[in-house]
Amino acid sequence: MVFCTKSQARFAILTPSRLTTPEAFHHIDFNDRRHQKLLADMQRLRGRVYEADGAIHRSELTADGRHKVTIDDQSWHVLTLDSNGEVVACLRFLEESKASDFNALRVRHAALARCPSYGSRFRCAVENEIQQAREMSIGFGEVGGWAVREDQRWSPEPLRIVLATYALLELLGSRIGVATATFRHSSATILQRIGLSVLRADGEEIPPYHDPQYGCLMQILRFDSRFPNPRYRPWVNSLMVDLADAPVIGRELRPSVFAAVCAGVSSRASSHRLRGYRPMRVPPTDERALALPAAVS
């Protein structure tokens, strides 16, 4: 596959606590110790990258350097691991399909929500996205926690981890949602090139805003996992196959709880997408054309 190099190893997926996995995934391991280690390694990567970029202060990290947030335990995480098993890149998806309205979402904490001029329009735009997802009978959620190890900043890895997240969401049955993106390292611009777009309310774009917590210009973008930039669709298709074969690590469940959860699984649609599917071969691409700066969102 065009994205894979000798320095790049494999994907791993961490599942949310108290949530089972679709049948599309072939290698599921409920292992508390492994899950906790990879989660901690991912949080340390985020902590190091975010602090170096000035997005957070050292005081916001744990004693061992982790950028630890409550929603990590509630989210899906796509990780890239190098040949030594160390986390190279990560991105998070928080499932919020059951949210009743804007006030139940994590994005309600964005500084934009308190803006006198655009706060109400921002709220309206997000609630429109929730309604659209419900009308189409697909899920809704938020993407964030994007970080890439320093030595991979000018490799295809920043792009690869984003497209892998598109692939994950397609394996979950497709998702519409929002992402809070910084303009540091052109992250917001890169995401729009990949397929995310600016939120709108009554036909008007919701503009970028300055976030005092992170000390930088940010923008709320929307995404639909079914529609990446057509240029990248073949890569998303191939990454779906890669992720279906990747290790999926969840937390251990008591047998009675596990049986109850499995009894409620209704995600056959995702596995049907891969039945008889062959990954598309993508023509070789000059890696320099895919090189992207580090991205944090």
Image (cartoon, rainbow, N blue to C red):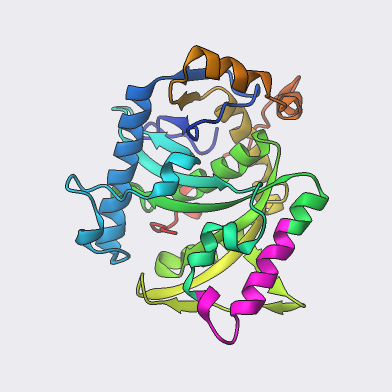
Q: Determine the image quadrant of residue 270.
A: top right
Residue lying at 18% horizontally and 44% vertically, measured from the top left = 64
Left or right side of 52 for 179:
right
State the predominant SS element of the stretch in magenta.
Answer: helix
Q: Is residue 219 magenta?
A: no
Q: Quarter of the image for the C terminus: give it.
A: bottom left
Vertical arrangement, residue 5 with respect to residue 33, above or below: below
* Residue placed furthest toward the left: 63
At 60% from the left and 64% from the top, the residue drawn is 221
Q: Which residues are magenta?
A: 112-130
Using the image, determine if residue 179 lies above or below residue 152. below
Q: Position of residue 23 (x, y in %)?
A: 65, 21
Residue name at image x 64 percent, y 52 percent: 99
- Queried whether the magenta region covers residue 129, the answer comes back as yes
Q: Is residue 285 visible?
A: no
* Number of marks in picture: 0
The one nearer the camera, 6 or 88, is 88
From the top left corner, tell me how far across and down residue 182 is, in percent. 45, 67
Residue 18 in view of the camera:
yes
Nearer-the-camera pick, 161 or 13 = 13
Please, which residue is most extreme toward the bottom here?
117
Identity of the residue furthest to the top in this view: 255
Where residue 33 appears, as percent x and y from the top left, is: 32, 23
Quadrant in which the N terminus appears: top right
Q: Residue at x 55, y 22 (%)?
A: 245
